[in-house]
Image: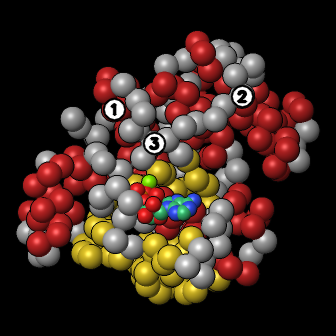
Amino acid sequence: MTYTSPIPVTDAVVYNGSGLELVDLTMAYGDIDVIRGVSMKVEPGTTTCVIGPSGSGKSTMLRGINRLHEPKSGDVLLAGESALKVKPDILRRRIGLVFQHFNLFPDHTALENVALALRTVKGLGKQQSLDVAADRLAEVGLADRAHHRPRDLSGGQQQRVAIARALAMEPEVMLFDEVTSALDPELVKGVLNLMASLGQRGMTMVVVTHEMNFARRVADQVVFMDAGKVVEAGRPEDLFDKPQSPRLRLFLSEVL
Ligand SMILES: Nc1ncnc2c1ncn2[C@@H]1O[C@H](COP(=O)(O)OP(=O)(O)O)[C@@H](O)[C@H]1O
Ligand SMILES: [Mg+2]
């Protein structure tokens, strides 16, 4: 697979991603710490891919970053300021999160799904929300699918609508949690290409993924997590070609 020729998107949309930093982040469910002192720095406009075995805390960490689950201690810095001091609903506009399951409204078209978010979250009027939604759909290469309902779109196209909906909030950072793992194999590439294109255009992204080729080619930084901790982090060529820890070597031997 190659990620150098993204799907057609409206050209020259440039993002102005903010920096993100996790500082000794600890998160728990009840008495059990599942994120245990995680620190990482994501420079503005860069892509960090997070890899690691199931249950290692990847999803919990993303949920902590935009406070769907409140951290127990430590800090999340967005553009240098504590995200823990930002009102959660404002924070979730500034940090978009896209999941494996896209949760589109089935009875609304792609255009309406994006426009509805603009009206309810950003308070735009009807016509303006439709205009902006059309631009965002063009940005993800779906201008010609705007009037289709989810059931008339492929899984990959539905996921791109969900990404357009998140982009419509004009986020400074985008978080992706295994967004291709529910897709049929032939649909994966279009979504990965879109993410690569967002990164090339300046979005700051944290991408939890099982797609090791994507991580190797697109990530500025790869973070390997196990048991709630960062075991190894660095440039993709270092992690994939010269893994230092036995746990990463074992993980790679199982997934590659
Ligand atoms: N809502 C929850 N309540 C209690 N424990 C949870 C909850 N969600 C996840 N966990 C536990 O937290 C740990 C990390 O899970 P998760 O963040 O989903 O890992 P990953 O995304 O890497 O698979 C696992 O041990 C999981 O069982
Ligand atoms: Mg997960």
Name the residue beneath numbered marker 1: 189
| Mark 3 CB within 8 Å of ligand 2 | no
Q: Earlier in the sequence, mark 2 or mark 3?
A: 2
Q: Earlier in the sequence, mark 3 or mark 1?
A: 3
Disc 1 versus disc 2: nearer the observer: 2
Name the residue beneath numbered marker 3: 179
Q: Earlier in the sequence, mark 1 or mark 2?
A: 2
Q: Residues within 10 Å of mark 1 (few under 14, many from 20)?
A: many
Report whether 79 appears left or right of 189.
Answer: right
Is residue 7 visible in this depiction of the protein?
no
Task: Give the residue drawn at x 75%, y 67%.
Answer: 88
**Answer yes or no: do the residues labelled 3 and 1 have beta carbons within 8 Å?**
no
Whole-angstrom CA distance, mark 1 to mark 2, is 24 Å
**Answer yes or no: do the residues labelled 2 and 3 have beta carbons within 8 Å?**
no
- Taking 200 as reference, is 64 above or below it? below
Task: Give the residue drawn at x 58%, y 12%.
Answer: 152
- Taking 128 as reference, is 107 above or below it? above
Q: Amino acid at mark 3?
A: Val
Q: Could you say where residue 76 lies in the image, as x and y percent from the top left?
A: 57, 79
Q: Amino acid at mark 2?
A: Phe
Q: Could you say where residue 89 lies in the image, as x and y percent from the top left?
A: 77, 62
The image quarter in which residue 94 lies: bottom right
Name the residue beneath numbered marker 2: 105
